Amino acid sequence: MKGFFKSSIGKKVLMSVSGLFLILFLLFHLCMNLVVVFSASAYNEVCAFLGSNWYAVAGTMVLAAGFLVHIVYAFILTAQNRKARGTDRYDNQNLPAGVEFASKNMLVLGVIVCCGLLVHFGQFWAKMMYAELAGTEGQFAPTDGAAWINWYFHDSPLAVAFVIVYLVWFAALWLHLNHGFWSAFHTVGLSNNVWIPRLKCIAKWFSTIICAGFAFVVIFAACGGINTKSDCCNKEKCGAKTECHQEAPCNPQTCPNAEQGK
Amino acid sequence: MAEGHKSLNLTLRVWRQANRQAKGEFKVYNVKDISTEASFLEMMDILNEQLINEQVPEGPVAFDHDCREGICGMCSLFINGRAHGPDDDITTCQLHMRKFNDGDTITIEPWRSGGFPIIKDLMVDRTAYDKIMQAGGFVSVSTGGVPDANAIPISKVIADEAMDAAACIGCGACAATCKNGSAMLFVSAKVSQLALLPQGKVEAAKRAKAMVKKMDELGFGNCTNTGACELECPKSVSISHIARLNREFLKANIKD
């Protein structure tokens, strides 16, 4: 394998393998997110399970390494490709129909996905896993994932903006996955004339299921579907009528039952 | 001329560049009474006759051509934004003027890719492909009598697939079309045609490594599977050969 990762194909294989790893993570993340649709308390248990435990932290570090490899090599390969293309450009280039939009714009789509990821990190990872590790207190408990989702997509004054940002993020992710999925298999050699159309079809279904699943959770939360009031979760104190998920001090500013609770 | 032909009056925007270092620019020429039955290269010949007669300072347009029957891979023009012009599965020499309309403006450019520097006007240096071939695009055979063609049985499916890959004429349309300037379709076709056959399997690992190494050394880009090369290839070489090259290259490196 000497020199393999310095070769053009070797670098592409790194992109593909890291991409497939991230695709598996997306599948796992979607399964986790869908839990909140059925039960907020069950979702919070998942959040607690994946909080600051050593296996969750180790998994996060492996995941971060996967992201890093994928992102760094995306920029390296793009820089090499730009150099290979040369400085001269065609006066006009009319590519025939059949060249996917996503395949020509994977870096741009990837940058949009990364921007969405930063917003997501700031809103959830920083307030949950990081807060738990750092021992900081937030508006909600770090393990009260359902409350955080409800806050950002339903209760927050910027909820509509957040929903739009997330839907744009998922659209970019759909396009990125649509090409990335089959392209990854092709690059590692697991493709031929029979499997190219099959992989493209699977890629469309897979990316649609993943992105529609994520979008559904966001829209579900935006419509007030998540049954949580963690701000006033102490039933006895504030008299919340909804299910309580954990003990936390009542916040009079956000608790609709604060007066009654007092 | 046969009955049914039409005459076209055309405006040509042709890229003129004295040499590799010189700054190029588009020059506009008008050609008249071009038969729809003429080939595109015949139209270029008529243009050149006109330019010689008019004694234009830049002289006739330099462009590559040879067999004019779609098998040598010498013609290379980028016409109205497409390699080999506005038709599918043909080379420039197989393009006919019936594809154009009277009064059209046709933009003619050379291949523009880092791997193919311009020599003059519409001629580019494609020796990079020859260098890749020299690195491993061959089968080593002992001298001696020619063996019987049926001595080694090869299934029809494999023979067809190898033949499809061998149809590559090395014109460079793939790298010229690719937004990454990648030569993967060309290299994969050459690796594939030999890796599929028993005679080529012996050196398959060595060949894949040597040809990819040379391709990288020459500065061609990385394949991102846009599939544009396949669509513009005059011989419809499939990108499935790229997957085979990737497999061959992976296998060769794992064996090391």
Image (tube, coloured by chain):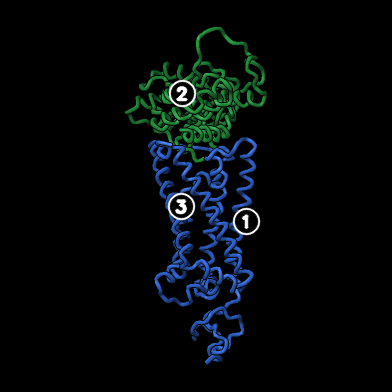
Chain colours: A blue, B green
Residue drawn at x 56%, y 47% as measured from the top left: A181
Where is mark 1, residue-wise? A209
Label 2, label 3: how many angstroms apart (C-alpha)? 35 Å
Q: State left or right for residue A36 relative to residue A125.
A: right
Q: Amino acid at mark 1?
A: Ile
Res A215 quadrant in image: bottom right
Figure check: A207 above or below A186: below
Residue at disc 3, secondary structure: helix
- Label 3: chain letter: A
Where is mark 2, residue-wise? B136
Q: Nearer the viewer, mark 3 or mark 1?
A: 3
Q: Nearer the viewer, mark 2 or mark 1?
A: 2
The reply to whether label 2 and label 3 mark residues of one chain is: no
Residue B83 position within the rendered picture, expressed as x and y whole percent measured from the top left: 51, 30
Residue B191 position within the rendered picture, expressed as x and y whole percent measured from the top left: 52, 27
Of residues A185 and B67, the one drawn nearer to the viewer in this rendering: A185
Q: Amino acid at mark 2?
A: Gly
Label 2, label 1: how many angstroms apart (C-alpha)? 44 Å
Answer whether residue B121 is visible to the viewer in this image: yes
Figure check: A67 above or below A78: below
Other-residue count near label 2 (Cα within 10 Å), few / some / many at <14 / 14–19 / ≥20: many
Other-residue count near label 3 (Cα within 10 Å), few / some / many at <14 / 14–19 / ≥20: some
Q: Amino acid at mark 3?
A: Gly
Residue drawn at x 51%, y 68% as measured from the top left: A161
Figure check: A166 above or below B145: below
Where is mark 3, residue-wise? A66
Mark 2 vs 1: CB contact within 8 A: no
Residue drawn at x 54%, y 52% as measured from the top left: A23
Answer whether residue B79 is visible to the viewer in this image: no
